Image (spheres, rainbow, N blue to C red):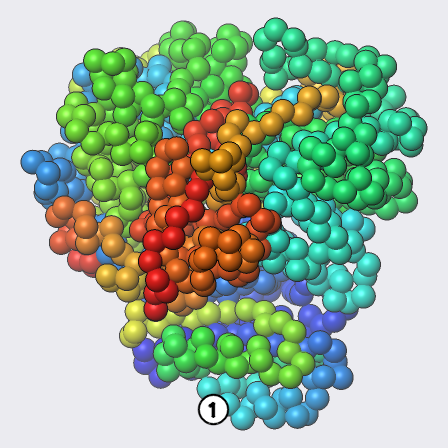
Amino acid sequence: MDLKRRSLLKSAAMAAAGSLALSGKNTALPILAAENDLPGGDDLTWNKAPCRFCGTGCHVQVGVADGRVMAIAGDKAADVNKGLLCVKGYHVGGILYGQDRLTKPLLRKDGKLHEISWDQAIDTIAQRIMQAPERFAFYGSGQWTIPEGYAAQKFMKGGLGNNHIDPNARLCMASAVTGFLATYGVDEPAGCYADLDRCDVLITWGNNPAEMHPVLFSRVTDRRSRGEQVKIIDIGTRRTRTTDAASEYLEMKPHGDVAISLGIMHLLIANENYDKNFVKQHCNFRGAEADTPTLQGEAITEDEFRTRIAKYTPEHVEQLSGVPADKIRMLGDLFANRDIRITSLWCMGMNQHTMGTAINSLVHGVHLLSGHFGRPGDAPTSLTGQPSACGTVREVGTLAHALPGGRVVANAEHRQQSEAFWNLKPDSINPAPGYHTVKMFEQFTKATAAGGDIDTIFVQVTNPGQTLPNLNLLFESKKGLEDKFLIVSDVYPTATTELADLILPAAMWVEKNGMFGNSERRTQQWFKMVDPPGEARDDCWMTIAIAHRLFELGHAGMKDRDGQFIFAVKDDQGAEIPIWDFEHYYDTNVDKHLFEEYRQFTTMKHKNLAPYDVYVEARGLRWPVVEQQDGSWRETKFRFSGFDDPFVTQGQEFEFYHSTSGDGRAQIWFHEYAPPPEVPDDEFPFWLCTGRVLEHWHTGTMTRRLAPLNRAMPTAYVEMHADDALELNIRQGELVTIESRRGTAELPVWIDGRGRPARGSVFVPFFDETKLINNCTLEAHDPFSKQPDYKKCAVRITKLAKVTS
Amino acid sequence: MPISGLVVVFETSETLDDLAIERLASHPAIEVGQRQLDRVAVVVDSVSNEQDIEIWEWMRRLPGVSDIKIAFVGFDDDNKQGDVERGDTNQNAAKQDGLGEHCGTI
């Protein structure tokens, strides 16, 4: 690096640090002027982008020189992070520059990978789809940008009439979706991150934001550091860094969260200190149907609710959850107190759960029954693990049953609306939901003769070879099935490319235009800043190029009702721009064209979005975004609350305007506690819980290529309780085999390390491709969300070797 | 060689005294910037990733330091900060038939 640039970077570093320091002690986080005071110059330019990693949606400033990302700074103008970044975020620029970037399309022949041209690659895919379009599946991601997901959605459901498209978000937040739908009739949190600035009590339900969403968690810990009283109650199955900051730690048994939420509601009812006015005006009671439970359930009376919940006394809840009865009473008293504000946070703990829909609905119910809803600081809020799980999966609807804007394929009116927006012939969209993730891979890895009716899967922006549960069943058994064809678009070699028949090199993050939607309904936009390496190309382009090859081959679905290509983009003179040819892909802003088309879908469920150009100027906006009389666009922080939500009827304090009961009310659900599907026994005596660590993001394909992060956390491990280790004669660092009924993994032991599991349970992070803990996990899933439970199954531990260095 | 813009936060404004500033400034890789109550801006200009981590740990251990916030990081194209350590973490590329030879061509 030359001295001039080094000096410039040092100036920029001091400017960023100085302004962060000067924010001083009187604010929780630095609240700085929006002006960019980062020094630039002829050889260093700055532009905004959301971070590539988690669902928090922090904004970064990206410094580019000579076509390369040279620096990252927290974006002071961003409301989400106000200039702060976590340890992953400030290294995000380095993810582009791993030595082993994939740069050429590769086709496997006779067990070896051979370089082929993009034209051959696109042709190979199109020919396979053309042979059997109904046997093709598209597996995507909450890391898809909004335009990428929208293009994939339109290609599959509109073009091919095939609903076998599902995202990896099925594995991480599908139960949050079904919980919101069951309760409010519409998905996504009503509150926003500002709740963290106003709450008096923060309850983390099986959630570790200190490591997984550290910038968000710092909003609360910073308030404390300046003397505010904020009580943090951590409910979990292991002690974490969140526990370290907590006022109370309530250690529960797996599935204990269901009992705890029922126990709180029992106390509110039994003590007659629930918010009777709020419930009377804004809520109904709901229970599951006896014969065939549905997401809508059936109406029950308040008396019936009282009868059903009566048995969940603090003592009974203590038996089920392991949390002492007096602590259940403490929670009940907190929720009964209307003078304080309570925010609940959750993420994978409540979502990766065979009762995921139930526990999500129950925690919403606790807040509704107690009236801790809709005022700043009073909010039940789920977080997402991926940067666009909300924007791309939940809003664009890249799930097997969904259509954009909250529509579903099973609804004839929704299909007709979508066909109209896409200018397709009637009945182009198949009314039958496609395969959800687990089913999709079951059908792919099952022999065709045995009924495996998916023979080609195109995977974009995700790594199912590491993240699917029960990998031996759902992924490894693809081996030897000669007629099955796996296509993987990615940026680095992964556990998934290991079995890929065709590998496509992808552009990533600021190597392409993009839009994300974060956990608080905030839609974010960025522009391409650097070129991708070699022949790596945009995922969105791949989808459009395949669609156009099918158009050339005569696939009827790739033509709209006027005979035009379904992704046709025209210039100002009306001439079609050949965006399927990568040389011309950036002749126009394809993202903008796709987003403006997608915007039409968003008003039905009041998830209104602003025009693309408005997002260019903003650090994201929270929907619904509504145009004002002066032509400006106003975002919404608190949905369903009359003081902020423009769609609440004037004069109403709250209105749940997508209520499943059609009366503007939310549903307070009762669900009976049920034990987990697999529990420890004599043969497999330990609980296994899996999850993430601060330093690595998901499967580590990006963060493992960042030397500082990888050195800080170089290997996966198994956390054990010291007494369990002593009983098994296992010492710190020794290798053990973890074995479940489905598979094994070998890991070093970390006794009383960063996380401290309860006796009889172990924890293993899943970031390490060399130690695949998902060989052991269980594919059992929630009946509504179809989301598997990665947080609890039964394993045994066997000592393998002596201490390793 | 990494360049980081950091904010070192002390437990109280009293613990951020001249001695604390002196300690920070005594490190040749640290440049001390503006100071505000309990926090001070620093730039760390280290010769290697290893030294960067050492300095971070050293600062964390200084008396009275409660937190270090990150404001900025500069990437270095000379020592390839973003590169995976082959054979250590990139075992997939190595073991996948024929794939390793197609990687790293940028």
Q: Is residue A684 left or right of residue B33?
A: left
Q: Position of residue A124 (x, y in %)?
A: 16, 29
Among the 4 quarters of the image, the one containing residue A291: top right
| Total numbered badges shown on the rendered structure | 1
Q: Is A60 left, or right, of A744 in this rendering?
A: right
Q: Position of residue A526 (x, y in %)?
A: 46, 49
Q: Nearer the viewer, residue A576 or A63?
A: A63
Label 1: few (<14), some (14–19) or many (≥20) C-alpha neighbours in 10 Å? few
Q: Secondary structure at mark 1?
A: loop
Q: Residue at x 37, y 82 (%)?
A: B47
Horizontal arrangement in the rendering, residue A396 relative to residue A639 (left or right): left
Query: In the image shown, does A521 or A755 lie closer to the viewer?
Result: A755
The residue at the point 58 percent across, 69 percent down is B69
Q: Nearer the viewer, residue A587 or A669?
A: A669
Pick the residue in front: A416 or B23.
Answer: B23
| Quadrant of the image occupied by residue A529 | bottom left
Q: Which residue is mark 1?
A: B28
Q: Position of residue A735 (x, y in %)?
A: 37, 56
Q: Chain of mark 1?
A: B
Residue A224 visible at all? yes
Residue farthest to the left?
Answer: A110
Residue shown at the point (91%, 30%) measured from the top left: A271
Q: Is A561 on the left-hand or right-hand side of A405?
A: left
- Amino acid carrying mark 1 in the image: Pro
Q: Is residue A718 above or below residue A555?
A: below
Please provide percent x and percent y for residue A630.
70, 40
